[in-house]
Amino acid sequence: MPPTLQLDALDQRIGFTNALLPNNEIKQVKERFQARMRDVLRIDKLIRNGHGTAQHLEHRSQLVEILTRYQVVLAPHKRLPVEILQQIFRYVCQGYNDSFPRYQDPPLLLCRVCSSWRFVIINMPEIWKSLHFFTGHPYSRSQKLDIVRLWFSRAGSLDLSLTLTDEVEDTERHGVDFLKGVIAPFSKQFIYLHLVLPTYQIQGFFSLPPGSLDALEALHVVNLKVTMPSIPQWTSSLTLPSLRRLRLHLNPLLDPKVFVMPWHQLEIFQCDSNLQLEDCHHLLLNCQKLTMFHVRIYGIKYTTPFPYEIHLPHLINLSVYLCDKESYDLFFLPLILPYLRSLTLYHFDGLSWSSGMYTNLLDRSKCSLEELYLGTVDTHPDQVIRILELTPLLRSITFSHKTDIPPEVYARIGRAEFGQHLEQLFLKGTRRLEPILNMLEMRQVLSWEDNESRSAISKLTFIETFCSQDEIKTHSHRIQSLQNNGVIISLLNSPEGYFLL
């Protein structure tokens, strides 16, 4: 009979916590690890020689479990210098400063690993300078308040970033006011704010004393209940001298005159409330630094042509949501956009394409568009050809489900007669698959020719649309062949209609 396995106090307690051991105990653990390893090897030898018993196997299983716990204690990362740990933690939290989505908050996650990591994390102010409560966070309002205060108290005097949603209108009953409890006390440190607040807190936010948010670089404000029928009778006293990015979703209608904003410094402006066309034009006269502009326009039919030219020399990305069933030419008429690269047009339920607007915009601006979204703009087949001819550098284009594209147009794209730089093609609605595959295969042939011939032709490597299942089965071998050659063919489960923003 084999002797009973003797386990002492060290065997029984080792490896059940993540606490770091002093050097003298580490030495003892290494010696014990080697001794237990020799015990396992001795049992293995008995088993190989045919002298092993069931009790030997049981002892071996216990020893392996103990060795695993010893290995946990002796893991190399347990002895990493604090400076290396800090650098790793900074890397883990990288990108979280600006509302970057994470499943869990990195500081909390790291604090839960072990007491030594917790000590390192708590003493790293840069880890605590950003906090983002996304939809689905299970915290109550009072818990959010406590967490924000704890977070930012550990950040010290560093710049702060906050995403906060307050889903309760009644402040008296719940006794929590984020404006007074968090935003006002730390206002001079914020560089990024994304706030979803009830009306009374929105009004209080824009009524903060001048100088409160002088460091703020990016602001996104959403009214929790966007139901007010008219423009509010309050104004902003904030000057926001450092603001570069602004996104507003307040009332259904927005009057920019109620805000004292540094419009001339904005680089990104997204307005999710409706902006009257005339107000939009007057606003753009002061927005010479804009690189991206997203706007919802109404009131076109009540507006006359704008009397001034609007030069936006830095604008690269323009997204326009049209709220009226009116011609949108009046919006584009005064614009001169020499560096425009991406244009997106949205409408509720489709709008006819204005070829004159597009031609005039290109002629005035001398711009070279690379991305064009017409998913809610209905285009005639002849206009599809004209768009591609006028915009030879297009890399990505989206057509609506009512835009008919004949097989010959696909073939001409495949032969690179136009659309030579197309890389992505999005086709809403139901499409025939065969002409699309013919187009892709022709572009593949062009890409296999000599370097001189294909130097000015891009590979068309992404298609998204909806086709019948019968067609997919019929052409499955062609689809697979194209995918094997690097073409991504995204076949949707259902046909897309108009896209509602």
Image: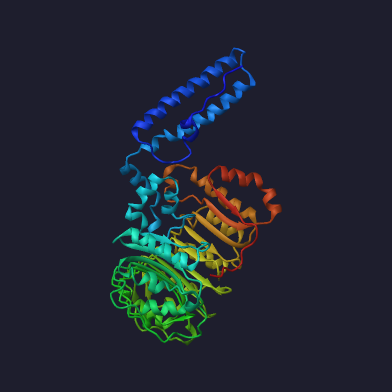
Which residue in the rendered view is the most extreme toward the right?
470
Vertical order, 279 against 12 (above or below): below
Task: Tell me which residue sits at (50%, 46%) in the image.
Answer: 446
Dividing the picture into quadrants, the one containing residue 393 is bottom left
Q: Is residue 334 visible?
A: no
Percent coordinates x, y for residue 431 in the rendering = 63, 59
Vertical order, 402 against 111 (above or below): below
Q: Choose between 147 and 228: the one closer to the eye.
A: 147
Q: Choose between 144 and 249: the one closer to the eye.
A: 144
**Count of labels shown?**
0
- In this rendering, position of residue 494 left or right of residue 453: right
- In this rendering, position of residue 465 left or right of residue 142: right
Task: Tell me which residue sits at (38%, 52%) in the image.
Answer: 94
Q: Choose between 425 and 490: the one closer to the eye.
A: 490
Vertical order, 477 against 66 (above or below): below
How was the colour assigned to the protein in this rendering?
rainbow
Q: Choose between 478 and 2: the one closer to the eye.
A: 2
Percent coordinates x, y for residue 59 in the rendering = 57, 24
Which residue in the rendered view is the most extreme toward the top?
49
- In this rendering, position of residue 176 left or right of residue 312: right
Percent coordinates x, y for residue 363 in the rendering = 39, 70
Q: Quadrant of the N terminus?
A: top right
Q: Can residue 400 be seen in this view?
A: yes
